Image (cartoon, grey):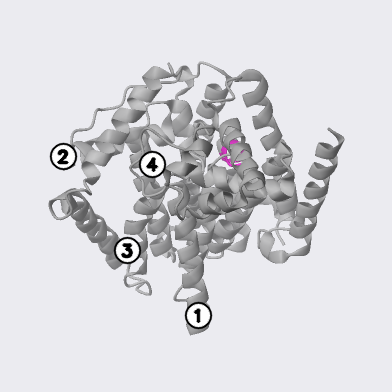
Amino acid sequence: MVKDILLTVFYLVLFNFLIARFRRLRFRNFKPVVTIALFNLKFLTGIFIWCIYTFYYKDVQNNDVHKFYSDAVVLRNVASEAPGDFVQIISGVGSNDASFDKYYADMKNWKRNFDEAPFNENQTIIKLNALLMFVSLRVYFVHILFMCFISLLGWVLLTNAVLKFAPQANAVFAIPVMLLPSVLFWTSGVMKEPVLVLGLGVFIWGLLSFGTGDRGKNVKALAVLVAGAFIIILIKFFVLVCLIPAVIAFLILRQNQSAVTIIIKYGLVNVLLLIAAFNINHVLPRLDLQQMLVNKQMHSVKEASYFKAGSRIDIPALDNNASSIIETAPVGIWNTITRPYLWEGKNIMMLASAAENILIILFMILCLAFSDFKNLKQLNLLLFLINFALAYFALIGICTPVLGNLVRYRAPVLPVFLFAFVLVLKSNIKPGKLQVLIC
């Protein structure tokens, strides 16, 4: 117990020192205290998550807060017993050999019944936690600190990359976005979301830096972009799929400032890529994206029924055809942004999520009310953020029949979506007392 406390305090002080010492680890438009305060708030939230899923939701074998860590303990023990096998499992080289099944049998979440992605995201997070145990000495709260720092770095990269194109005073409106309960909650625990946030931050920072400097800077930006894509594909492959149309449209005629041209290119790119996606199975029969969506939805519905999810909702059943998916996509987007409704709140967490949805809608309305579309200079960036976020919202909305899961899956991309609304704000907005937080 004493060791746990001392090691946790050591890393807490270390991370706070690093944030205070290195400018690149902080939000560029804000005083250092803002980044430090957010990190410590995230850590407290991480402890709160642990308490909820330890003492209230006691099924520690099935909740993500505990199950990946528990499997990581098994994998870390392999390093002590058979270091060579551990290296092979971590690297993935030869790890599918039957001789390794004796290790996988003790890990309840290493293999999944349903997995059509190129990488098993469960294995990624288990491996990460197992590696962290070399420095955490298996102290769970140290893992919380690392996850909070990882996601904070992702938010810093994302915020600094996007809001450098907004007036400095308007950047203050990023604070309420970062403090949204679901964003704070679901990106502060020992789960997949913090790593996904890091991947998004790295990817978007690299994308927005690419093509804006000399050859050396472009090479660096491209390397960062590829690194971000690699992180994303290891955690949530379909997030990268949702990014592809937005990225292609963003890079085409990037320097063109004509609003009509920008809008047309996004429309054409999305239409052409949708046509390609719906017909790629005729060229590559094993890559049937429509059937993959149908399978994913069916699996999610069966899983919700098996676990008797309390916040389960009915979603339109998908058929293996383009029209079914296109017709269902708006429903998915609507559910992702607006649900749960207040009257669907059956417990405190659902009521909190419903209240958050009201705040999100009010935030969007206020930003639009004080917008300046006539002088909008970042339409290309705005449409990139909206394009990616809505594609992602549509995907999770049509495949997720449990509102609790939907709120969680939305959290890592919600700031991307809301930052688009910050970009449309007038440049003469007065942040009032919040001005004290800006550098």
**Amino acid of disc 4:** Phe
At x 67% / y 45%, what residue is drawn? 80
Q: Earlier in the sequence, mark 2 or mark 1?
A: 1
**Amino acid of disc 3:** Ala
In the rendering, which numbered label is found on residue 321?
2
**Amino acid of disc 1:** Gly
**Amino acid of disc 2:** Asn
Pick the residue in front: 352 or 364: 352
Distance in Å between CA atoms under marks 3 and 4: 19 Å
In the rendering, which numbered label is found on residue 249?
3
Q: Earlier in the sequence, mark 3 or mark 4?
A: 3
Crowding at dot 2, Cα within 10 Å, few <14 / some 14-19 / many 20+, comes out as few
Q: Nearer the viewer, mark 3 or mark 2?
A: 2
Instruction: Say above or below: 26 vs 49.
Output: below
Looking at this rendering, what residue extends furthest in the left direction?
A: 282
Q: Which residue is mark 4?
A: 393
Distance in Å between CA atoms under marks 3 and 2: 25 Å
In the rendering, which numbered label is found on residue 422?
none
Crowding at dot 1, Cα within 10 Å, few <14 / some 14-19 / many 20+, comes out as few
Residue 293 placement, left or right of 439: left
- The span picked out in magenta is 183-187
Q: Earlier in the sequence, mark 4 or mark 2?
A: 2
